[in-house]
Image (tube, rainbow, N blue to C red):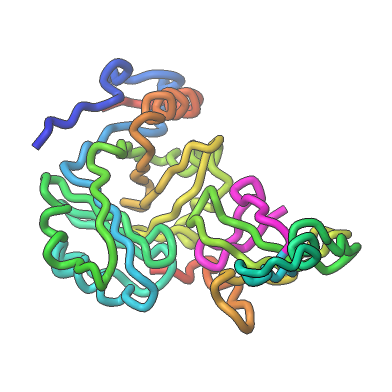
Amino acid sequence: MLITCPYCGPRDVSEFAYQGDGNRTRPDPASTDAEAWSAYVYDRLNPAGIHNEIWQHAGGCRAHLAVVRDTLTHEIKSVRFAREHGAPPHGRRTSGAKA
Amino acid sequence: MVEQLSPLEPVFRPGSYGNFVDGVGVTLSEIAPGSIVQLAAWPGEEKKLMATIGSVTGLKLADGAGAGASSERCSAFGFAPGKFLVSDASEGLATAFAGKVTAAIGTITDLSHGRTAIRIGGPKSEWVLAKLFAVDFSLTAFPVGSGISTTHHDVFTQIQRSGPDSFDLYVFRSFARSFWKMLCHASDEVGYEVR
C-alpha cells in the first residue's frame, strides 16, 4: 500500500503510523459529560468502505495527514496535511516537480 | 569547540572490497562536515528562513518540497514542511545563524555531533540505495541538490543527492556504525571502495 504524502510523494505504508479515526470530535476539555467522553474514546463507526483517518508520516517528514481510505480495497482516495482544511492538495510532489 | 569523533572509526578501513574484479561499483566515504544544523520555520515564516539560509551559506534554495542546493563548502535541503538541514565544512554554523534566525522566524538545532554524514558515489549508488529504501532514486524523481527523509528498519535517514551518481546520507550518530556495516554488505555484490 502506498500513501502519497503531500510533502514527500508516494511512500510505502511502513513509513507511516496510524493515528486513529479521523471522524472523532473531542469534547470540551472542561466537559464532565461522561457519555460524550465515552463516545469520543470508544465509539467507532467501523465502516466497510470510505473512512476518514489520521496518519503520521513518522518515517519521513513527520507531518500528520488526513487520509481518506477505502477499508474494503485499501485504495487511498485523498491525502492532505491534517492542519489544512478544504480541498486535499495531494500529489504536490510528483516526478521531476522539484528543484 | 569539543573535538568531533567519528563513530565509524573502529570499522572504517580504506581499501577495495567485495566483487570489485570488474570495477568498483560504489565508493563509500565519511564527509565529516564541521557543522550540521537543523532549522525550522514557524508557519508562514518559511520564506524568511530560506532567505536567511541563502544569506549565510550563499546557497539559493528553490521553492518546493525537498528543494536544496550545495556548494564546495555548504549544503542545504528541505526535509519536511518548513524544516531544513544545513551543513558546512567548517564549525560554527549554528553561531552564524544565531543572530539571524530570530525567535519570531523559527528555531535552530545544532546537530553537528548528533549526525554522521556518509557519502555514496559511483555508477551503482542508485542500485545499492534502492536495496535499502523504498524510494525512487532516479534523476527525474530525485534531482541533484534535492533531499528527502526516509527510514531503513526504523533508522531515520536524510538523503541529499550531491551529484548525478552521488548521495549524502545523514544518520543518527548512535546508529551510524551499524548503518555503515549494512551499507558495506549491500555494496558487496557491486564491489566497493572505502576512502
Q: Residue furthest front?
A: A32
Q: Position of residue B15 (x, y in %)?
A: 29, 19
Q: Seen from this angle, which residue lies furthest bottom?
A: A86
**Residue at the (83%, 61%) spot, across then down:** A44
Instruction: Give the overall secondary structure of the magenta segment.
Output: strand
Magenta span:
A1-21
- Left or right of residue A59: residue B67: left
Name the foreground residue: B135 vs B36.
Answer: B36
Q: Nearer the viewer, residue A74 or B107?
A: B107
Q: Is residue B166 above or below residue B182?
A: below
Image spot of residue A4 (x, y percent): 62, 63
Picture quarter with the C terminus of chain A: bottom left
Number of numbered discs on residues:
0
Residue B22 visible in rendering: no
Left or right of B41 on screen, residue A26? right
Residue B180 percent location from the top left of the image: 39, 27
At which x and y percent is residue B5?
20, 27
The answer to whether residue A96 is visible is yes
Q: Viewed as shown, does residue B88 lie left or right of B129? A: left
